[in-house]
């Protein structure tokens, strides 16, 4: 379950701002990794989380925020400024215990980022893969969630537009977003206002008994939407409530047309959208994509730690010889303690202090927020005047900040 947002002009004063909270079981560790671009031999294969599929001839460099046990990612961005995030949705085609190995939502995210240079191309990549390989498989290795099966929705953005892709089994619909704001939160949102869809969708839905032509124009949400009762969620945490709350927050922050990276941080830290407990906001991601007329590099901000209210958003800019370090790379792909990366372990110690209410904890929380605020301000000034030669100065930026963060927590 996740909340994903995008703001485009005229909600912003030029850039496209993408943001996501990844809400996963609290036992999971989410890592941040950088995978360089690569060429692959003809006919080669790639092993994703569960299955093997044909590899692309070339894969783009990607920055991924991912559960340590998956090949794919909950959210990420590539070197071309394409952002993708996924969230679970429950549809009438979700069957408890139906976990045959296929592509999981996280796989679609990474495959789209590695294989596309625009948001529109990413949508085409994902829909083609969905129709060829389907979606499914165990979605969490925590035994407490062994029967947790779902379909997926995605929000995809680049510097000019955004797309919503919603699925039910192998069926799909899209909606193009060219201005303003949009958000999704673990519930289908596309009705009859779709931009495109899988072939013969109304007829296929009618065959399954989910739709009748006498209802009027085909409505994807009405036909396929379902509810999942496997969690004990408060009313504000229910998917429709979160989607409504997120929409209101986006509208309020963007009403003056200057929606910013700080506004997206605030939305992701909202109490109704920040999970703690059975489900946890395990990581958060924000990207600021410069407009086509600008030479300013895109800037991406990731926490790599749970609870954005007690985490620091740290910047990454794609550049030559990018090195994000190893503080956010899990040494193991299991659910055991060994899967916790160094920043995660240090942050757990820091979180205990910050939650304690002690003078030390209050001071630490204030220091971390000041660190983030100063970084946003300094980077904003840097990006206003930087050119390609200056990007060598930010090669190790994420690495340096995470190393400092670990020292401060410890």
Image: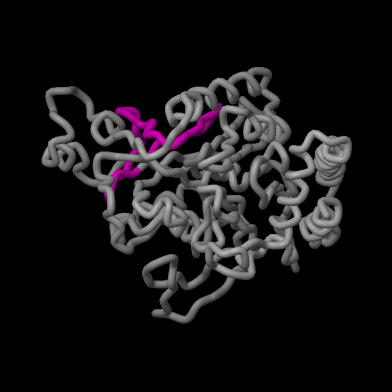
The question of residue 247 being in magenta is answered with: no
Q: With respect to residue 300, does 399 lie above or below?
A: below
Q: With respect to residue 311, does 266 lie above or below?
A: above
Q: Is residue 51 left or right of residue 12?
A: left
Query: Is residue 377 visible to the viewer in this orientation of the structure?
Result: no
Query: Is residue 134 visible to the viewer in this orientation of the structure?
Result: yes
Measured as percent of width and height from the top left, residue 12 is found at 66, 29
The residue under the point 28% across, 53% down is: 97
Q: How is the image coloured?
A: one colour
The residue under the point 73% across, 33% down is: 262
Measured as percent of width and height from the top left, residue 144 is found at 43, 51
User: Closest to the observer: 282 or 261?
Assistant: 282
Q: Is residue 38 left or right of residue 319?
A: left
Q: With respect to residue 95, does 187 lie above or below?
A: above
User: Closest to the observer: 217 or 33?
Assistant: 33
For the C terminus, give its image quadrant: bottom right
Measured as percent of width and height from the top left, residue 178 is found at 51, 33
Count of numbered tags: 0
The residue under the point 39% across, 34% down is: 187
The question of residue 182 being in magenta is answered with: yes
Measured as percent of width and height from the top left, residue 359 is found at 88, 35
Boundaries of the magenta span:
167-196
The residue under the point 41% across, 51% down is: 145
């Amino acid at each position: 379950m996740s909340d994903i947002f995008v703001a485009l002009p005229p909600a912003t004063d030029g850039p496209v701002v993408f943001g996501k909270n990844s809400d996963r079981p609290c036992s999971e560790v989410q890592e941040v990794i950088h995978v360089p671009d690569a060429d692959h031999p003809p006919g080669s294969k790639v092993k994703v989380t569960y299955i093997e599929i044909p590899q692309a001839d070339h894969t783009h460099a990607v920055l991924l925020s991912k559960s340590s046990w998956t090949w794919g990612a909950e959210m990420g961005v590539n070197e071309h400024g394409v952002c993708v995030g996924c969230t679970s949705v429950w549809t009438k085609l979700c069957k408890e215990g139906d976990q045959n190995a296929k592509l999981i939502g996280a796989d679609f995210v990474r495959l789209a980022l590695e294989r596309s240079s625009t948001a529109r191309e990413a949508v085409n990549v994902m829909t083609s893969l969905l129709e060829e390989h389907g979606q499914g498989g165990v979605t969490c290795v925590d035994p407490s969630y062994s029967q947790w099966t779902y379909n997926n929705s995605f929000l995809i953005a680049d510097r000019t537009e955004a797309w919503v892709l919603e699925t039910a089994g192998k069926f799909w619909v899209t909606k193009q977003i060219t201005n303003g704001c949009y958000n999704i939160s673990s519930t289908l949102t596309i009705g009859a206002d779709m931009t495109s869809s899988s072939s013969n969708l109304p007829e296929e839905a009618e065959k399954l008994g989910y739709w009748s032509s006498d209802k009027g124009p085909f409505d994807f949400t009405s036909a396929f939407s379902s509810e999942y009762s496997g969690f004990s969620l408060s009313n504000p945490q229910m998917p429709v409530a979160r989607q409504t709350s997120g929409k209101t927050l986006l509208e309020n922050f963007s009403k003056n047309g200057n929606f910013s990276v700080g506004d997206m941080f605030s939305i992701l830290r909202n109490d109704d959208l920040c999970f703690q407990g059975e489900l946890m906001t395990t990581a958060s991601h924000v990207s600021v994509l410069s407009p086509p007329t600008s030479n300013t590099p895109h800037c991406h901000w990731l926490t790599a730690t749970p609870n954005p209210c007690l985490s620091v958003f740290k910047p990454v800019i794609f550049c030559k010889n990018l090195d994000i370090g190893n503080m956010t790379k899990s040494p193991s792909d299991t659910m055991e303690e060994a899967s916790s990366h160094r920043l995660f372990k240090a942050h757990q110690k820091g979180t205990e202090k910050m939650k304690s209410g002690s003078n030390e904890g209050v001071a630490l929380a204030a220091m971390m927020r000041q660190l983030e605020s100063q970084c946003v301000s300094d980077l904003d000034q840097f990006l206003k005047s930087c050119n390609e030669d200056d990007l060598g100065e930010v090669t190790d930026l994420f690495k340096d900040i995470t190393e400092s963060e670990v020292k401060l927590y410890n």
